[in-house]
Amino acid sequence: MNTLDVVDMTGAAVGKVNLEESTWVGTQGEEALREVILAYQASRRAGSASTLSKGEVSGSGRKPWKQKGTGRARAGYRQSPVWRGGSVAFGPRPRSYAVKTNKKIKRLAFRRALADRISAGDVTVIDELKVPEIKTKTIVTLLKTLNLDRGALIVMGTVDFDVALSARNIPGIDVVTAESLNAYHLVRYPAIVITREALAAVESRLKGSGSEAS
């Protein structure tokens, strides 16, 4: 069983927290993590690129000129893809790039990502994160105290709008709940700040008593 130091908002150590064995996956999960990250990024693509087919370009169906005798190439309709202002042949159409991923693969990827970040020393457990008022300076000061000036992901046990609003204007900072935390979050940010409550919720997910780890 591994332990992590717990600090308060001043950076002072206030105790330790024991990590459940379910947090660790040995050497498994690297390919699963890659698969899940690619699937997540693909699902974020808008897929909204769209071009007009010949049936969608405005215009009549009349031939531009008669078939023979003009000396020009034959033309059947003004919406032809070979004409300027006409349709597009085989152009992109709205589509979904979403990739279906097995729940077991998502869970394994989540555990792999979390274990890697903990092993690398990138996870800071904070006893409690509260702000007296909605103020960006409070979060900036906290990050400087924890030596996390390069950016970080803040994981809360429950939704805290005061913390979220205080952090939203800081570049490289994002606030999520333990329930919405996924493998992509874990690998994207340089560091992770997680409350003791959120860490317990994440471990509950890994044991299968909460929502699926993804």
Image (spheres, helix red, strand yellow):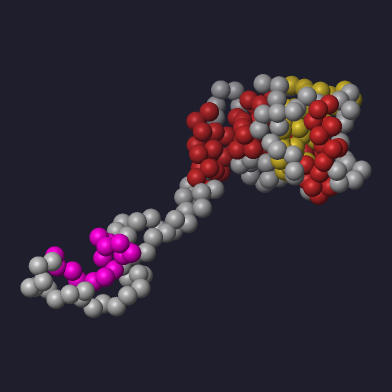
Please report the residue visible at 81 percent of the width from the left and 34 percent of the height from the top.
140
Q: Which residues are magenta?
A: 73-87
Task: Identify the residue shown where x is 75% and y is 27%.
Answer: 148
Residue 23 x, y percent position in the rendering: 68, 29
Looking at the rendering, in which quadrant would you find the C terminus? Answer: top right
Please tell me whether residue 54 is drawn above or below residue 26 in the rendered image.
below
Query: In the rendered view, does 33 fall on the left or right side of 153?
Result: left
Q: Is residue 90 above or below residue 20?
A: below
Instruction: Give the side of residue 148 with respect to residue 26, left or right.
Output: right
Task: Report x, y in % for residue 151.
Answer: 71, 32
Figure check: 207 above or below 21: below
Instruction: Examine the structure image and report whether residue 126 is included in the region drawn in magenta.
Output: no
Total count of labels:
0
Residue 170 horizontal/vertical position (percent): 74, 39
Q: Main secondary structure of the magenta part?
A: loop
Q: Residue at x 39, y 60 (%)?
A: 51
The reply, left or right, for residue 12 in relation to residue 84 is right
x 86%, y 25%: residue? 11
Quarter of the figure with the N terminus: top right
- In the displayed image of the protein, which residue is found farthest to the right? 132
Query: Would you identify the image quadrant in which residue 130 lies?
Result: top right
Asked which quadrant contains residue 205, the reply is: top right
Q: Residue furthest front?
A: 71
Image location of residue 9, percent across then percent down: 87, 31
- Look at the image and tell me whether residue 69 can be seen: yes
Q: Kindly indicate the quadrant of the structure image that contains residue 202.
A: top right
Does any portion of residue 210 appear in the rendered image? no
**Is residue 56 or residue 31 the one in the foreground?**
56
Depth order, front residue of 21/160? 160
